[in-house]
Amino acid sequence: MSDSDEDVQLEARLREQEYFRPPARFVGQANVSDPAVYDRFDEFPDGFEEYAVLLDWDDHWDAVLDASNPPFFRWFTGGRLNASYNCVDRHLADRKNQAALVWEGEHGDRRTLTYRDLYREVNEFAAALRSEGVDEDDVVTVHLPMVPALPITMLACARIGAPHSVVFGGFSASALAERVDDAGSDFVVTIDGYYRRGEFLDHVQKADAAMEETDRDPEVLVWTRHDEVHESVSISDDYTLVSEVLADHERERVEPVSRDAEDPLFLMYTSGTTGKPKGCQHRTGGYLAYAAGTSKYVLDIKPEDTYWCAADIGWITGHSYIVYGPLALGTTSVMYEGAPDFPHKSRIWELAEKYDVDIFHTSPTAVRQFMKWGPEHVEGYDFSFRHMTTVGEPIQPEAWLWYYTHIGREKAVIVDTWWQTETGGHLITNLPALADMKPGSAGLPAPGIDPAIVDDRGEEIDPASGRAGNLVIRKPWPGMLQTVYGDDDRFVSTYWEEFSDTGSDDWRDWNYKAGDGAVHERDGYWRILGRLDDVMNVAGHRLGTMELESAVAEVEDVAEAAVVARDHPEKGEVPEVYVVLREGVEASDEVRGRIVEAVEDEIGKFARPANVAFVDDLPKTRSGKIMRRILENISNDEDLGDTTTLRDPDVPEQIRRQVQGD
């Protein structure tokens, strides 16, 4: 093998982990406990009908898949349905008085929306939108925090056939304006404000600033957090108060618009640190079927459950696994407005006890935060999860074990899930009753999903070889994005071009590029190594951040860690480690030594960190993902770039001062 950079293969060096069997009590009640499910989905593409039949269709589909024009695949062609009807109306006969959404706000505010309540409020707002001029196929941009108005708005848009484009509430005015322009939105829905850590935040001011930046002149509709506009907020006379419009549509009913399965349901913009955000366009039929199917098969959701996904609806996780998937199944979902540590660090477990939550869904970032605070904040709360999920990035084995021990109390099943905004739902994850759990591993492919590992030339690496490479998906699936909104060429170049024969009209020649490194282990399990952008070349070894950070996490003093590459005149790149310590642990040379030793033991002496920096926090996106590129800029004394869209824009400069001392 050549020593040139392009020929050095991505490596996987994390040591093997033990297996944990799913509890017998879970297996006995699971939605899916028959291994034959995989055989059924192997009948491609017809196996995916098993998800589609979970929905009510106005017209049955003629074909499950039309693959005649790859990569523009069409799912359940000829079928017609309405997403709002499937999430609300069809449950009224059997569970109109059952809670659909249980919302916990700050200051003791809470609301329980039964399916009948949700039906009424969705209809009224759908009528209001129509009265304001929203027509079928108009894209409505939604900029709302975690309040009931958000799912109500989404479902009202779906009811009248207007695709929604939800922009995460924490995003800046510029991010909002950019997405309004790209989507060509003539309507923006926002709110006067919301609470965060006890403080009322003026939210509508972002719309004010965005309207100054946008090239368009959209109508702005403003919900209010309380019955009236908050005294600290000023609302432009050009805006329309939702409360005033709703008053004209009390108890009005709107017939759900029957949508073609391929009609767009929503846009979800990715939020990369460079380049124009991509508007991932998702279809109605295939997306909703896949969200409902994976909610039932992977998350094991049942109508009688109380389910809590602690994500924000402004991200794809919230779309698929707070709104569309769980509501399509008729379950009760918890929504939470506040921060996980306000007014105290036991807030999550207090609410889990209060609402008797059965299924808990969170991110590795949150788990590491819980680890940092310590198990004493969990103790004493009477909750019992039967199922727990992680989502958003690979979870280190140490964090997985902490989650299993202290949150699941060794009684809950855990599924790690790999998927993306673009995929619409889980692609690699165990069906929880059918496979042993393995810390640090995403598990097995979901039914009907066909992943593979290819090298940088696109040549397939032998299955189950334990060798790392580029993750691709070889067969289409119903939840996949249709295109990049308004830019088919970018859709092809971003996701398909590198590992596909783009001149072929045979779908078998087209491979979806995930952009992640992965390894297919000899036991058949798949491990995600992180974004290929974060891979570093250490002494001729290409290593993913997940491998190095997992080694650091083996040190019990460590709450969180990020590893980045620093340029070196002789070695090319050397790893630098940024560490957040658990509460009560002091930074010291002894702790630093244990971290270095752990990397040498787990990965090898060649990967010895050049430096270990102790910091108070790490730069993270609003969804909680660590922004390693910013840390790499700090390590290489480069400009920090735009940090305004981070959860805390001040963190990078604080780290730079800590590390560089100026």
Image: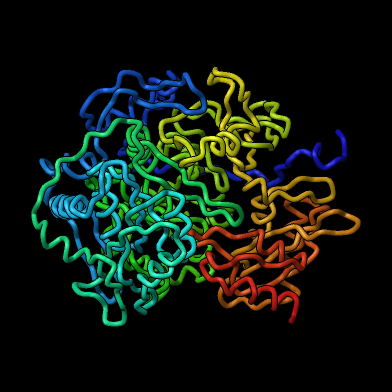
Picture quadrant where residue 166 is located: bottom left
- Check the image and name the residue furthest to the right: 570
- Check the image and name the residue furthest to the left: 251
Q: Where residue 429 sits in the image (x, y, percent)?
A: 48, 39
Q: Nearer the viewer, residue 203 or 370?
A: 203
Q: Residue at x 58, y 60 (%)?
A: 626
User: Would residue 307 be visible to someone looking at this image?
Assistant: yes
Picture quadrant where residue 519 is located: top right
Q: Residue at x 8, y 54 (%)?
A: 251
Picture quadrant where residue 124 is located: bottom left
Which image quarter holds the N terminus?
top right
Q: Residue at x 45, y 47 (%)?
A: 414
User: Would residue 99 be visible to someone looking at this image?
Assistant: no
Q: Does residue 451 appear to the left or right of 632 in the view shown?
A: left
Q: Residue at x 18, y 55 (%)?
A: 128
Q: Nearer the viewer, residue 566 or 255?
A: 255
Q: Does residue 365 appear to the left or right of 408 in the view shown?
A: right
Q: Where residue 316 sits in the image (x, y, percent)?
A: 42, 49
Q: Where residue 263 sits in the image (x, y, percent)?
A: 34, 34
